[in-house]
Amino acid sequence: MHGLHAGPPRVEGRGDLDFSRAVLEKLYSYPLKRRSIAYLLWLVAGFFGGHRLYLDRTGTGLLMFFTGGGAVVWWLVDIFLIHRMVRKFNEDQARRKAEGLAPRQLAFMPAKGETLPPEPFWAAKRGTRVRLFADSFVMMLAGGSMGAFASGTGVYEPIIAVLALIAITLLGTRWDVLSDLPVLRGFDRWAHRLRLFYYTNDPGGALSLAFRQVLAVFAIFRQRRRTEAKLYLQLGAWFTIIFTTFDIIEALGVGGGGFNPGFLMLDFVQTFFATYAFAAPIGAILNKHILLQRSDRVIWVLSGIAVVFILIGVF
Protein backbone atom coordinates (compact mmCIF):
# COMPACT_ATOMS: atom_id res chain seq x y z
CA MET A 1 0.00 0.00 0.00
CA HIS A 2 3.00 2.30 0.26
CA GLY A 3 2.68 3.30 -3.40
CA LEU A 4 -0.90 4.51 -3.12
CA HIS A 5 -1.42 8.23 -2.67
CA ALA A 6 -2.90 9.11 0.72
CA GLY A 7 -5.09 11.89 -0.64
CA PRO A 8 -5.26 15.54 0.35
CA PRO A 9 -5.00 16.28 4.09
CA ARG A 10 -8.16 17.09 6.00
CA VAL A 11 -8.98 20.78 5.85
CA GLU A 12 -11.47 22.42 8.19
CA GLY A 13 -14.77 23.00 6.42
CA ARG A 14 -13.94 20.55 3.63
CA GLY A 15 -15.21 17.07 2.96
CA ASP A 16 -12.56 14.59 4.02
CA LEU A 17 -11.70 12.14 1.24
CA ASP A 18 -10.42 9.75 3.89
CA PHE A 19 -7.85 8.19 1.59
CA SER A 20 -5.59 7.65 4.58
CA ARG A 21 -3.30 4.68 4.44
CA ALA A 22 -5.28 3.01 7.22
CA VAL A 23 -8.54 3.23 5.25
CA LEU A 24 -6.89 2.08 2.05
CA GLU A 25 -5.41 -0.87 3.92
CA LYS A 26 -8.91 -1.86 5.04
CA LEU A 27 -10.38 -1.39 1.57
CA TYR A 28 -7.47 -3.25 -0.02
CA SER A 29 -7.96 -6.20 2.28
CA TYR A 30 -8.81 -9.53 0.69
CA PRO A 31 -11.82 -10.78 2.67
CA LEU A 32 -12.92 -14.33 2.02
CA LYS A 33 -16.53 -15.44 1.86
CA ARG A 34 -18.05 -17.77 4.42
CA ARG A 35 -20.29 -20.68 3.51
CA SER A 36 -22.43 -20.18 6.62
CA ILE A 37 -23.31 -16.62 5.58
CA ALA A 38 -23.93 -17.67 1.97
CA TYR A 39 -26.34 -20.41 3.09
CA LEU A 40 -28.12 -18.03 5.46
CA LEU A 41 -28.58 -15.50 2.64
CA TRP A 42 -29.81 -18.30 0.39
CA LEU A 43 -32.43 -19.12 2.99
CA VAL A 44 -33.71 -15.61 3.78
CA ALA A 45 -33.02 -13.74 0.51
CA GLY A 46 -32.36 -16.46 -2.05
CA PHE A 47 -35.44 -15.61 -4.11
CA PHE A 48 -33.83 -12.22 -4.73
CA GLY A 49 -30.35 -13.56 -5.42
CA GLY A 50 -29.01 -12.31 -2.10
CA HIS A 51 -26.46 -15.14 -1.79
CA ARG A 52 -25.18 -14.53 -5.32
CA LEU A 53 -24.84 -10.80 -4.68
CA TYR A 54 -22.86 -11.68 -1.57
CA LEU A 55 -20.57 -13.88 -3.67
CA ASP A 56 -19.99 -11.07 -6.19
CA ARG A 57 -22.07 -12.74 -8.90
CA THR A 58 -24.01 -9.58 -9.65
CA GLY A 59 -25.25 -10.60 -13.11
CA THR A 60 -26.85 -13.90 -12.10
CA GLY A 61 -27.88 -12.40 -8.78
CA LEU A 62 -29.89 -9.72 -10.54
CA LEU A 63 -31.35 -12.33 -12.88
CA MET A 64 -32.61 -14.24 -9.85
CA PHE A 65 -33.71 -10.90 -8.45
CA PHE A 66 -36.13 -10.37 -11.37
CA THR A 67 -37.30 -13.97 -11.78
CA GLY A 68 -38.14 -14.79 -8.17
CA GLY A 69 -35.23 -17.21 -7.85
CA GLY A 70 -35.83 -18.61 -11.31
CA ALA A 71 -39.41 -19.54 -10.44
CA VAL A 72 -38.08 -21.21 -7.24
CA VAL A 73 -36.27 -23.94 -9.24
CA TRP A 74 -33.00 -22.01 -9.56
CA TRP A 75 -33.18 -21.13 -5.87
CA LEU A 76 -33.46 -24.82 -4.94
CA VAL A 77 -30.63 -25.85 -7.27
CA ASP A 78 -28.31 -23.21 -5.82
CA ILE A 79 -28.18 -24.95 -2.46
CA PHE A 80 -25.99 -27.56 -4.16
CA LEU A 81 -23.83 -24.90 -5.88
CA ILE A 82 -23.07 -22.57 -3.00
CA HIS A 83 -20.11 -24.60 -1.77
CA ARG A 84 -18.42 -24.40 -5.18
CA MET A 85 -19.23 -20.69 -5.63
CA VAL A 86 -17.69 -19.84 -2.25
CA ARG A 87 -14.58 -21.87 -3.08
CA LYS A 88 -14.15 -20.19 -6.48
CA PHE A 89 -14.53 -16.71 -4.97
CA ASN A 90 -11.96 -17.42 -2.28
CA GLU A 91 -9.52 -18.94 -4.76
CA ASP A 92 -9.76 -15.88 -7.02
CA GLN A 93 -9.32 -13.55 -4.06
CA ALA A 94 -6.22 -15.46 -2.97
CA ARG A 95 -4.82 -15.26 -6.52
CA ARG A 96 -5.34 -11.50 -6.62
CA LYS A 97 -3.56 -11.10 -3.31
CA ALA A 98 -0.61 -13.22 -4.46
CA GLU A 99 -0.29 -11.25 -7.72
CA GLY A 100 -0.62 -7.85 -6.02
CA LEU A 101 -3.86 -7.04 -7.85
CA ALA A 102 -6.68 -5.07 -6.28
CA PRO A 103 -9.24 -7.25 -4.45
CA ARG A 104 -12.45 -8.17 -6.24
CA GLN A 105 -14.46 -5.44 -4.53
CA LEU A 106 -11.96 -2.86 -5.88
CA ALA A 107 -11.33 -4.40 -9.29
CA PHE A 108 -11.56 -0.93 -10.88
CA MET A 109 -8.63 0.36 -8.81
CA PRO A 110 -4.89 0.24 -9.52
CA ALA A 111 -2.75 -2.57 -8.16
CA LYS A 112 -1.05 -2.01 -4.83
CA GLY A 113 2.22 -0.78 -6.28
CA GLU A 114 0.69 1.89 -8.49
CA THR A 115 0.39 5.52 -7.42
CA LEU A 116 -2.76 7.60 -7.42
CA PRO A 117 -2.38 11.21 -8.61
CA PRO A 118 -2.52 13.98 -5.96
CA GLU A 119 -5.92 15.01 -7.36
CA PRO A 120 -8.41 13.53 -9.85
CA PHE A 121 -7.24 13.97 -13.43
CA TRP A 122 -10.60 15.50 -14.33
CA ALA A 123 -10.56 18.12 -11.53
CA ALA A 124 -9.66 21.15 -13.70
CA LYS A 125 -12.33 20.30 -16.27
CA ARG A 126 -15.15 19.70 -13.77
CA GLY A 127 -14.34 22.32 -11.15
CA THR A 128 -15.63 25.55 -12.74
CA ARG A 129 -18.42 27.62 -11.22
CA VAL A 130 -20.58 27.16 -14.34
CA ARG A 131 -20.44 23.39 -13.90
CA LEU A 132 -21.43 23.79 -10.25
CA PHE A 133 -24.61 25.60 -11.31
CA ALA A 134 -25.27 22.94 -13.94
CA ASP A 135 -24.91 20.20 -11.33
CA SER A 136 -27.31 22.10 -9.05
CA PHE A 137 -29.87 22.00 -11.85
CA VAL A 138 -29.38 18.24 -12.21
CA MET A 139 -30.02 17.85 -8.47
CA MET A 140 -33.27 19.78 -8.92
CA LEU A 141 -34.24 17.60 -11.88
CA ALA A 142 -33.37 14.32 -10.19
CA GLY A 143 -35.05 15.28 -6.90
CA GLY A 144 -38.20 16.63 -8.54
CA SER A 145 -38.50 13.63 -10.88
CA MET A 146 -38.06 11.25 -7.99
CA GLY A 147 -40.73 12.98 -5.92
CA ALA A 148 -43.13 12.99 -8.88
CA PHE A 149 -42.45 9.29 -9.49
CA ALA A 150 -43.19 8.45 -5.86
CA SER A 151 -46.34 10.56 -5.85
CA GLY A 152 -47.60 9.04 -9.08
CA THR A 153 -46.86 5.39 -8.28
CA GLY A 154 -47.19 5.36 -4.51
CA VAL A 155 -43.72 3.79 -4.31
CA TYR A 156 -41.84 5.80 -1.69
CA GLU A 157 -39.11 3.31 -0.76
CA PRO A 158 -36.59 4.70 -3.31
CA ILE A 159 -36.78 8.08 -1.54
CA ILE A 160 -35.66 6.39 1.68
CA ALA A 161 -32.78 4.71 -0.18
CA VAL A 162 -31.61 7.95 -1.80
CA LEU A 163 -31.86 9.86 1.49
CA ALA A 164 -29.75 7.10 3.05
CA LEU A 165 -27.25 7.49 0.20
CA ILE A 166 -27.03 11.23 0.85
CA ALA A 167 -26.55 10.66 4.58
CA ILE A 168 -23.90 7.99 4.04
CA THR A 169 -22.03 10.22 1.57
CA LEU A 170 -22.13 13.31 3.79
CA LEU A 171 -21.51 11.74 7.17
CA GLY A 172 -18.95 9.27 5.89
CA THR A 173 -16.63 12.15 5.00
CA ARG A 174 -16.82 13.65 8.49
CA TRP A 175 -17.60 10.99 11.07
CA ASP A 176 -14.94 8.30 11.32
CA VAL A 177 -17.06 6.42 13.84
CA LEU A 178 -19.33 5.17 11.03
CA SER A 179 -16.58 2.85 9.85
CA ASP A 180 -16.73 0.98 13.18
CA LEU A 181 -20.49 0.52 13.58
CA PRO A 182 -22.24 -2.71 12.53
CA VAL A 183 -24.29 -2.47 9.31
CA LEU A 184 -23.26 1.17 8.80
CA ARG A 185 -19.71 -0.06 8.41
CA GLY A 186 -20.71 -1.96 5.28
CA PHE A 187 -22.39 1.11 3.77
CA ASP A 188 -19.38 3.23 4.72
CA ARG A 189 -17.07 0.81 2.89
CA TRP A 190 -19.38 0.92 -0.12
CA ALA A 191 -19.24 4.74 -0.09
CA HIS A 192 -15.43 4.59 0.03
CA ARG A 193 -15.39 2.29 -3.01
CA LEU A 194 -17.69 4.65 -4.88
CA ARG A 195 -15.53 7.64 -4.01
CA LEU A 196 -12.36 5.83 -5.06
CA PHE A 197 -14.03 4.86 -8.33
CA TYR A 198 -14.80 8.49 -9.15
CA TYR A 199 -11.31 9.51 -8.05
CA THR A 200 -9.86 7.50 -10.91
CA ASN A 201 -12.79 7.80 -13.35
CA ASP A 202 -14.38 11.01 -14.63
CA PRO A 203 -17.93 11.18 -13.20
CA GLY A 204 -19.02 13.16 -16.27
CA GLY A 205 -20.71 16.46 -17.00
CA ALA A 206 -24.18 17.62 -16.05
CA LEU A 207 -25.82 16.34 -19.25
CA SER A 208 -24.50 12.81 -18.90
CA LEU A 209 -25.40 12.80 -15.20
CA ALA A 210 -28.95 13.96 -15.89
CA PHE A 211 -29.48 10.98 -18.20
CA ARG A 212 -27.27 8.48 -16.37
CA GLN A 213 -30.11 6.01 -15.95
CA VAL A 214 -30.79 6.08 -19.70
CA LEU A 215 -27.11 5.73 -20.58
CA ALA A 216 -26.93 2.75 -18.24
CA VAL A 217 -28.55 0.74 -21.04
CA PHE A 218 -25.24 1.00 -22.88
CA ALA A 219 -23.18 0.19 -19.78
CA ILE A 220 -22.60 -3.35 -20.97
CA PHE A 221 -20.40 -2.05 -23.79
CA ARG A 222 -17.99 -0.09 -21.57
CA GLN A 223 -16.12 -1.51 -18.60
CA ARG A 224 -16.08 1.78 -16.69
CA ARG A 225 -19.85 2.18 -17.03
CA ARG A 226 -20.39 -1.44 -16.05
CA THR A 227 -18.38 -0.91 -12.88
CA GLU A 228 -20.28 2.25 -11.99
CA ALA A 229 -23.63 0.60 -12.70
CA LYS A 230 -22.62 -2.40 -10.60
CA LEU A 231 -21.89 -0.20 -7.58
CA TYR A 232 -25.31 1.47 -7.75
CA LEU A 233 -27.06 -1.80 -8.56
CA GLN A 234 -25.59 -3.24 -5.38
CA LEU A 235 -27.07 -0.36 -3.41
CA GLY A 236 -30.43 -0.63 -5.17
CA ALA A 237 -30.58 -4.41 -4.80
CA TRP A 238 -29.85 -4.45 -1.08
CA PHE A 239 -32.33 -1.70 -0.28
CA THR A 240 -34.98 -3.34 -2.44
CA ILE A 241 -34.41 -6.68 -0.74
CA ILE A 242 -34.83 -5.00 2.65
CA PHE A 243 -38.02 -3.19 1.62
CA THR A 244 -39.50 -6.24 -0.11
CA THR A 245 -38.78 -8.46 2.89
CA PHE A 246 -40.72 -6.06 5.12
CA ASP A 247 -43.54 -5.96 2.54
CA ILE A 248 -43.75 -9.78 2.54
CA ILE A 249 -43.80 -9.93 6.34
CA GLU A 250 -46.52 -7.27 6.43
CA ALA A 251 -48.56 -9.01 3.73
CA LEU A 252 -48.32 -12.41 5.41
CA GLY A 253 -49.36 -10.83 8.66
CA VAL A 254 -52.59 -9.57 7.11
CA GLY A 255 -53.83 -13.06 6.20
CA GLY A 256 -56.97 -13.90 4.30
CA GLY A 257 -55.86 -12.84 0.83
CA GLY A 258 -53.63 -10.00 1.94
CA PHE A 259 -50.68 -11.44 0.00
CA ASN A 260 -50.72 -10.35 -3.66
CA PRO A 261 -47.65 -11.71 -5.55
CA GLY A 262 -48.35 -9.64 -8.68
CA PHE A 263 -48.58 -6.36 -6.81
CA LEU A 264 -45.56 -7.27 -4.71
CA MET A 265 -43.45 -8.01 -7.81
CA LEU A 266 -44.52 -4.74 -9.47
CA ASP A 267 -43.59 -2.80 -6.34
CA PHE A 268 -40.33 -4.76 -6.21
CA VAL A 269 -39.33 -3.86 -9.78
CA GLN A 270 -40.39 -0.21 -9.44
CA THR A 271 -38.42 0.17 -6.20
CA PHE A 272 -35.28 -1.35 -7.70
CA PHE A 273 -35.26 0.68 -10.90
CA ALA A 274 -36.22 3.95 -9.21
CA THR A 275 -33.52 3.52 -6.57
CA TYR A 276 -30.87 2.98 -9.24
CA ALA A 277 -32.19 5.65 -11.61
CA PHE A 278 -32.21 8.45 -9.05
CA ALA A 279 -29.28 7.37 -6.86
CA ALA A 280 -26.81 7.39 -9.78
CA PRO A 281 -26.92 11.11 -10.70
CA ILE A 282 -27.27 12.29 -7.09
CA GLY A 283 -24.47 10.06 -5.85
CA ALA A 284 -22.16 11.01 -8.73
CA ILE A 285 -22.65 14.75 -8.20
CA LEU A 286 -22.12 14.63 -4.45
CA ASN A 287 -18.97 12.52 -4.78
CA LYS A 288 -17.67 14.71 -7.59
CA HIS A 289 -17.79 17.84 -5.45
CA ILE A 290 -16.38 16.05 -2.41
CA LEU A 291 -13.43 14.97 -4.57
CA LEU A 292 -13.09 18.54 -5.85
CA GLN A 293 -12.65 19.49 -2.20
CA ARG A 294 -15.57 21.88 -2.18
CA SER A 295 -16.43 23.27 1.23
CA ASP A 296 -18.85 21.24 3.30
CA ARG A 297 -21.35 24.07 2.87
CA VAL A 298 -21.46 23.47 -0.90
CA ILE A 299 -21.98 19.73 -0.42
CA TRP A 300 -24.80 20.28 2.07
CA VAL A 301 -26.47 22.86 -0.19
CA LEU A 302 -26.41 20.42 -3.12
CA SER A 303 -27.92 17.74 -0.90
CA GLY A 304 -30.53 20.20 0.37
CA ILE A 305 -31.53 21.06 -3.20
CA ALA A 306 -32.21 17.39 -3.94
CA VAL A 307 -34.22 16.92 -0.74
CA VAL A 308 -36.30 20.09 -1.27
CA PHE A 309 -37.20 19.12 -4.84
CA ILE A 310 -38.05 15.58 -3.75
CA LEU A 311 -40.57 17.10 -1.35
CA ILE A 312 -41.87 19.47 -4.04
CA GLY A 313 -42.35 16.53 -6.39
CA VAL A 314 -44.18 14.52 -3.76
CA PHE A 315 -46.53 17.30 -2.68
Image (cartoon, rainbow, N blue to C red):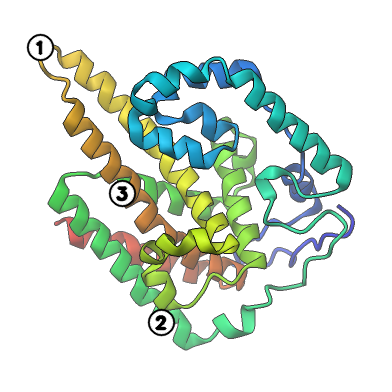
Number of other residues with Cα within 10 Å of mark 3, as a class: few under 14, some 14 to 19, many 20 or more: many
- The one nearer the camera, 166 or 65, is 65
- The one nearer the camera, 200 or 8, is 200
Sequence order check, earlier mark of 3 and 2: 2
Q: Residue furthest left?
A: 256
**Disc marking residue 159:** 3
**Disc marking residue 256:** 1
Residue drawn 88% across the image and 60% down it: 3
Cα–Cα span, label 2 and label 1: 53 Å
| 250 up-or-down from 256: above or below | below
> Is disc 3 in contact with disc 1, using a CB cutoff of under 8 Å?
no
Residue 264 at what x, y percent from top left?
A: 22, 31
Residue 140 at what x, y percent from top left?
A: 30, 70
Q: Secondary structure at mark 1?
A: loop
**Disc marking residue 133:** 2
Residue 84 visible, this orientation:
yes
Q: Secondary structure at mark 3?
A: helix
